[in-house]
Amino acid sequence: MKNKLNNENSVELFRRAKEVIPGGVNSPVRAFTDVDTTPPFIVKADGSKIYDEDNNEYIDYVGSYGPMILGHNPSIVNEKLKEQIDNSLSFGAPTRLEVEIAELIKEIVPSIEMIRMVNSGTEATMSALRAARGYTGRNKIVKFAGNYHGHGDCLLVQAGSGALTHGVPSSSGVPESITDNTIVAEYNNIESVANIFKNYGRDIAAVIMEPVSGNMGVVPATQEFIDYVREITREYNSVLIIDEVMTGFRLALSGAQSLYKVEPDLTCFGKIIGGGLPVGAYGGKKEIMQCVAPLGSVYQAGTLSGNPLSMIAGITTLTYLKNNLKIYDDLEIKGEKLQRGIEKAIEDFKIEATVNRVGSMITLFFSSKKVKDYEDAKSCNTELFAKYFKAMLNERIYLPPSQFETFFISNAHSEKDIEDTIKAVRNTLHNLSCS
């Protein structure tokens, strides 16, 4: 085990932050509440590494929660950003870049006929649902327990991620009248979906789902399940919205929908299409997207939507991925090696844990059974995860500070990074088995 972390500067910054920012953070999971430690305050990052205010270096598996598929600080993106900065930061007016990224996404993702840029994944899901309601003239939506689609009011019902970590499946401040039209189904449970459509089918505007959940940890939909959801939404003329904010362009160039061979009506994007800058987008069938203002009556707007910095970073990242498809093969190899290493340590040290992985997304669950849905995720041993997390942080491995989040592998992670991480996992699980 490495020497204990020096975190004096982070401790002091966190103390100051709590005086002026709720909980000391601008997004709840960053508070490290459930892992009972002080969050490192990050100064810089490069490749697979991040560095904190106390000069500690970590191998990073957060990757800004997904977008850093090329690693931190990629020169190809930075050079384009510097060029754009010389032209100004923002205009609040149309630019060539907005057209180019829309054309690029349409080329890469077959289900996209038209697309609208927004500023976050939350904006994307909220806007897609509004478009679906406007298009169908219906009000009810179906979401799945443990799927997280941002903090829009109607979606904060049995959500994953921070809502799950902090034990708040429904947020205060959200009137019941808003969630009355939100129906929660069980993930990977065909019977649950069938019963909902039997009772409410003609009133359901849309079903929104993560094809691979990343916010109760990595939990993939089964092929049978996603095929059924597609079939029944078509039967009832409901809109199928696939949330690829996390999985889009990461699990495959054309997203998880290409892995499952499913064609959604609408797709929500984020993360990678901004190359690390704030961004979101929703798009799909032209007949639905033409309901959106100024063409249609579904209003949605954003002064900074299509911000030129986010657009050039996204164009550069997506173009690089399109021209270097071997990256996805390499990520699979790295992911498989890390998974095998963790599973070997679990077996050797007789820890009650299991691993879920899809491509470059991976979660170690402290559970004696395979995690396939929200109830399985909730049964995990979060106290043991907290001990694991702190020990791994001391090993200079930076993981998401929640049992219900995803580790992200980037193209910048080297073979040595993976090997060093496996060694740290073995040290940590060995110590936990002895305690």
Image: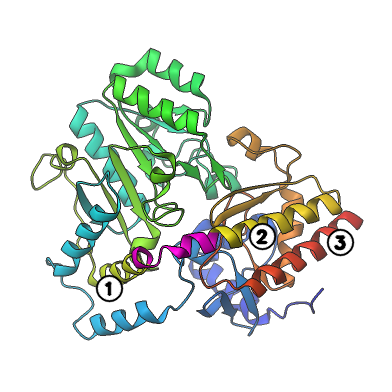
- Residue lying at 45% horizontally and 22% vertically, measured from the top left: 193
> From where the camera sits, is residue 22 visible?
no
Please tell me the numbered disc located at residue 431: 3
Going by the numbered disc 3, the residue's amino acid type is Asn
The quadrant the N terminus occupies is bottom right
Q: How many marks?
A: 3
- Please give left or right for residue 351 compared with residue 46 in the image: right
- Write down the residue under mark 2: 338
Please tell me the numbered disc located at residue 264: none
Going by the numbered disc 1, the residue's amino acid type is Leu
The quadrant the C terminus occupies is bottom right
Query: Pointer 1 and pointer 3: residues touching (CB < 8 Å)?
Result: no
Picture coordinates of residue 262, whole percent (x, y): 37, 37
Q: CA distance from mark 2 to mark 1?
A: 34 Å
Picture coordinates of residue 333, whole percent (x, y): 59, 60
Magenta stretch bounds = 321-331
Q: Secondary structure at mark 2?
A: helix
> In the picture, residue 155 is in which quadrant?
top left
Picture coordinates of residue 126, whole percent (x, y): 31, 44
